[in-house]
Amino acid sequence: MARSLSTRGRFVLAYLVLGATAGAVLSGFVVLAKRPGPTPPPPWSNWKPSTASIGDTAQAIASHIGGAYRLEDGRQLARVVLDAPPPAATRVEAIALANGSALRGLYDPGKTILYTLCGRQRNCALQGQASVGRGDVLRRETLELALYTLKYTPSENVAVFFPPATGEKAANNVFFFNRDDFNRQLKRPLRVTLPRPAPPIPGRIGGRELQTIDELTGGHRYRFGVQTATSGRRVLVLQPAA
């Protein structure tokens, strides 16, 4: 009888140990469940478009960015139009980067978003006296348009056409960017690239930010025209600006 009780006691002890182990495991799961998950990365930008289609997203970006850039008196610096000026607004079947007469790159217009910075005067010219400071802010706006577009749409390229320069009857300058130009900038928050929470007015860009603008827009300014290739295709040809 004593031997039988001893065996029963061992079973009871074994059950108690198993119960304690199971309780410890469950407690561990509860602790893990209560632990906060990994901190999500910061958003790329404070504002983001909420539309679904590419065209609507680009239009939302144009309205948001264009409305943020102002002159000292509060007037909007330039409207952002979701289109190209003539003759680039005519249907083209390819975009080519050129060096003299040689073409060194062909891009699909269907994968390119076109914007025009447009003033209130004829042919989108800006009012008032042109200045280096105004040009710097327009380049910052161009850069911000490109970054937002490449971040929030699947487009591969962005072209931003500038207003006509003083004395010119029509626009002939464009900044052209490919997604690969901004590999680092699209992976980190926008404020790392452009720290100011609001765009500066002309003449008020800090030296460090101006250096960033110079680095990211330098070499991307072109003169443009439309040509008919030997194949019969209409090509928007971009020649490096002097």
Image: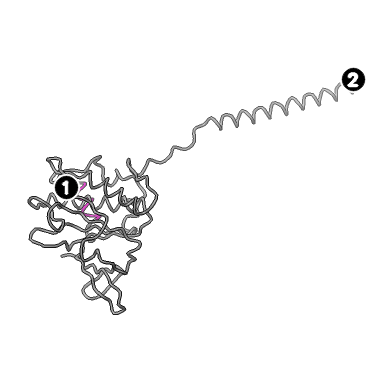
- Between 159 and 182, the residue placed more toward the observer is 159
Residue sitting farthest toward the right: 1
- Between 45 and 63, the residue placed more toward the observer is 63
Residue that badge 1 annotates: 77
**Amino acid on which disc 2 is placed:** Ala
Residue 141 image point, x, y percent: 22, 50
Quarter of the image that includes the N terminus: top right
Is 58 left, or right, of 29 in this rendering?
left
Location of residue 196 by image quarter: top left
Is 68 left, or right, of 9 in this rendering?
left
Q: Residue at x 19, y 49 (%)?
A: 210
- Between 35 and 98, the residue placed more toward the observer is 98
**Magenta span:** 209-216
Residue sitting farthest toward the top: 2
**Is residue 211 within the magenta segment?**
yes
**Amino acid on which disc 1 is placed:** Leu
First in sequence: mark 2 vs mark 1: 2
Location of residue 181 by image quarter: bottom left
Is 124 left, or right, of 12 in this rendering?
left
Q: Alpha carbon of mark 2 to alpha carbon of mark 1: how far?
A: 99 Å
Q: Secondary structure at mark 1?
A: loop
Location of residue 8 by image quarter: top right
Mark 2 or 1: in front is 1
Quarter of the image that includes the C terminus: bottom left
Residue that badge 2 annotates: 2
